[in-house]
């Protein structure tokens, strides 16, 4: 497969990402005392590491602008939103609806991400996994989960 | 003799019903996911980490280790039958293994892969057992100066020997070190980057980070890729499993050479199975009387690399168990599993937790026996499992990650954190950055800081101390040499070649 090289590619993203990470770390760590080399404060190591990130990011950025890097693969909005929604559904339901219902809706939701959807499979998989989850976590591992909605 | 006493102790731990059961579960799950495309050992271990919390530490490690080396057996099966490496380290096996399958010798290829892996695994396990005490004793003489330099060397080596861009990997290590510093500072008690979130006060939970980066992010990346491609078809006709006399004669020396290469290279940080199998393949091709047979179904091209990668995967436990230095992402997961149980991976594990250490070693050999016995008779089942479509797999992975994380924290917020790390990990992949170096940095972060701090305190703020102590100097010089190596064009070319398989 031929991947085109471009200036606005992976290297640009990675470089900016490292710089952002480092800069954010330095900014939010500015209140931490660095201390001296002999007696390091809590801010010493973070400052060191974050400066390193900015430096690495700058090199990656410049290199990518000079030489170009592989293009960033297209983002599938369906996959990203699907994952966010699936995990969101689990987080929202597990506390109140209990393990059985929460597993059912989470798995059913996850199945919707796949474009080649088969309804019979969705029903079987979500029921099967819901039962398996209860058996594994509640009966075998004896974790005090809420199993049913109250 | 000490070694025999210790191995005896190990077997008394490993040969209990519970530990045998979890060893079996581990190698079965390992083979399964080695066979399944789109689900690797690191993802699986991340997914199962929360469950191990409810097991005894030694049982947990026995199972996780089983998953790791089991996946190498499984990975070779898909390489041979499908020309598709189920696992990164079996890329090389595709070259001749699949050709053998096309020539109707799939059974022989599978058999030699299993036997080679077994011999490699057995020898390497013995090496681990024999070498561990001496290395651990040596490491125990280290002060924080040497420890710090050792960790620097470990991280540099992991970065240089791993595939992909070195600069990106360094950046990822730094992000990992940084994330490892979030929470309460151990020596001053100051809160760092907590932002008033109670969950962050004790630092970022390793399980949440790991399930996010390797579970959720992997699923997301796979889903994106899947929306574009289809599924390959398997060679069903396995043929006779036995090897002919000529094939035996060709593969026996290759197995021994592969075992030696794998055992040696496995110890190096960052390499794992991939470098071992690649090096073994290259050597076999160089030594062969007729190198043109390679790529057309030469049995040495299967026997050598398969022995090498399994030997390497056993010896890659050495740095973790004797020095507390995880050498690749899987070992970082093992370190995480130990930390869940309050065991800090270091040279003290061998002496303070002998049951854990020797039990794990003994179980690795038992696991290899189980794999050898099971692999061939079960090939039919593995082939059928290959047909499990990814659309049934990923909801399972997601649900296991969710329930696992929730079971540890009992807070829906942790699921959102996991989602956050998942999206972060996915973004890293988009930008061509592997998340593996990040986990290494994360695991080592706080220990590196502590050792740096102590070393500087004792030396009175003089950084030269790292160059004045001989052992520390050696580590730092080696690290520097590795970094120089990367700049050399010829080395870079072979790294690229390795990356492309």
Image (cartoon, coloured by chain):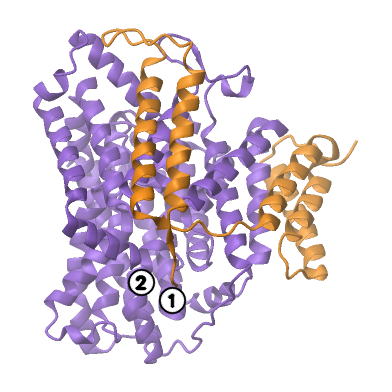
Chain colours: A orange, B purple
Alpha carbon distance from label 1 to label 2: 8 Å
- In x, y percent, where is residue B476? 17, 33
Is disc 2 surrounded by few (<14), some (14 to 19) or many (20+) residues within 10 Å?
many
What's the mark number on residue B376? Answer: 1
Whether labels 1 and 2 belong to a single chain: the reply is yes
The reply to whether the C-beta atoms of the residues labelled 1 and 2 are less than 8 Å apart is yes
- In x, y percent, where is residue B389? 64, 70
What's the mark number on residue B114? Answer: 2
**Quadrant location of the N terminus of chain A?**
bottom left
What's the mark number on residue B25? Answer: none
Q: Is residue B370 above or below residue B321?
A: below
Q: In terms of depth relative to the viewer, which is nearer, B156 or B92?
A: B156
Is disc 1 surrounded by few (<14), some (14 to 19) or many (20+) residues within 10 Å?
some
Q: Name the outermost residue toward the bottom.
A: B103
Q: Can residue B17 be seen in the rendering of this structure?
A: no
**Residue at 75% in and 37% down:** A145
**Residue at 22% in and 88% down:** B245
Chain of the residue where label 2 is placed in the rendered structure = B
Please identify the quarter of the rendering in which residue B283 is found. Answer: bottom left
Chain of the residue where label 1 is placed in the rendered structure = B
Q: Is residue B452 above or below residue B46?
A: above
**Residue at 61% in and 39% down:** B420
Q: In terms of depth relative to the viewer, which is nearer, B347 or B102?
A: B102
């Amino acid at each position: 497969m031929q991947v085109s090289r471009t200036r606005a590619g992976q290297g640009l993203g990675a470089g900016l990402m490292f710089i952002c990470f480092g800069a954010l770390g330095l900014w939010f760590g500015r209140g931490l005392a660095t201390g001296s080399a002999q007696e390091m404060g809590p801010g010493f190591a973070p400052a060191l590491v974050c400066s390193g990130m900015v430096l690495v990011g700058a090199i990656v950025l410049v290199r990518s602008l000079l030489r170009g890097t592989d293009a960033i693969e297209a983002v599938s909005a369906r996959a990203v939103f699907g994952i966010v929604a699936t995990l969101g559904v689990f987080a929202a339901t597990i506390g109140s609806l209990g393990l059985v219902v929460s597993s059912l809706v989470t798995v059913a939701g996850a199945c919707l991400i796949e474009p080649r959807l088969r309804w019979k499979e969705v029903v079987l998989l979500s029921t099967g996994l819901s039962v398996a989850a209860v058996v594994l976590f509640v009966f075998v591992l004896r974790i005090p989960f809420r199993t049913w909605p109250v | 003799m000490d070694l025999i006493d210790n191995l005896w102790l190990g077997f008394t731990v490993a040969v209990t019903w519970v530990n045998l059961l979890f060893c079996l579960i581990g190698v079965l799950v390992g083979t399964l996911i080695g066979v399944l495309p789109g689900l690797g050992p690191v993802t699986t271990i991340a997914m199962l980490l929360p469950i191990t919390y409810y097991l005894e530490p030694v049982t947990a490690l026995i199972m996780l280790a089983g998953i790791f080396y089991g996946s190498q057996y499984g990975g070779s099966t898909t390489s041979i039958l499908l020309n598709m490496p189920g696992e990164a380290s079996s890329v090389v096996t595709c070259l001749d293994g699949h050709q053998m399958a096309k020539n109707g010798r799939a059974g022989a290829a599978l058999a030699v892969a299993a036997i080679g892996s077994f011999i490699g695994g057995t020898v390497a396990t013995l090496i681990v057992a024999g070498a561990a005490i001496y290395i651990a004793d040596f490491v125990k003489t280290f002060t924080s100066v040497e420890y710090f330099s050792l960790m620097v060397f470990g991280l540099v080596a992991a970065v240089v020997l791993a595939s992909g861009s070195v600069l990106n990997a360094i950046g990822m290590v730094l992000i990992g070190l940084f994330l490892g510093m979030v929470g309460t500072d151990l020596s001053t008690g100051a809160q760092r980057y907590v932002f008033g979130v109670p969950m962050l006060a004790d630092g970022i939970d390793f399980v949440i980070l790991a399930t996010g980066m390797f579970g959720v992010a992997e699923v997301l990346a796979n889903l994106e890729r899947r929306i574009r491609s289809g599924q390959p078809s398997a060679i069903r006709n396995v043929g006779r499993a036995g090897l002919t006399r000529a094939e035996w004669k060709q593969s026996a020396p290759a197995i021994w050479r592969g075992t030696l290469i794998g055992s040696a290279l496995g110890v190096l940080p960052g390499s794992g199975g991939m470098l071992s199998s690649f090096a073994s393949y290259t050597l076999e091709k160089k030594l062969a009387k007729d190198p043109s047979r390679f790529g057309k179904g030469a049995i040495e091209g299967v026997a050598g690399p398969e022995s090498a990668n399994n030997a390497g995967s056993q010896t890659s436990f050495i740095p973790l168990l004797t020095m507390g230095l995880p050498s690749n992402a899987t070992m970082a997961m093992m370190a995480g599993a130990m930390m869940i149980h309050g065991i800090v991976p270091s040279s003290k594990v061998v002496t303070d937790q002998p049951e854990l250490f020797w039990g794990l070693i003994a179980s690795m050999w038992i696991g290899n026996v189980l794999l050898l016995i099971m692999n061939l008779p079960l090939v039919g089942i593995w082939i059928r499992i290959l047909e499990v479509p990814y659309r049934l797999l990923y909801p399972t992975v997601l649900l296991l990650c969710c329930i696992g994380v929730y079971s540890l924290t009992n807070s829906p917020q942790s699921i959102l954190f996991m989602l956050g790390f998942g999206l972060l990990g996915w973004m890293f992949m988009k930008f061509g950055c592997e998340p593996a170096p990040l986990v290494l940095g994360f695991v080592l972060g706080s220990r590196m800081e502590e050792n740096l701090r102590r070393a500087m305190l004792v030396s009175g703020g003089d950084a030269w101390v790292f160059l004045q102590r001989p052992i520390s100097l050696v580590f730092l010089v080696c690290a520097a040499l590795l970094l120089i190596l990367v700049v050399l064009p010829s080395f870079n070319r072979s790294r690229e070649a390795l990356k492309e398989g």
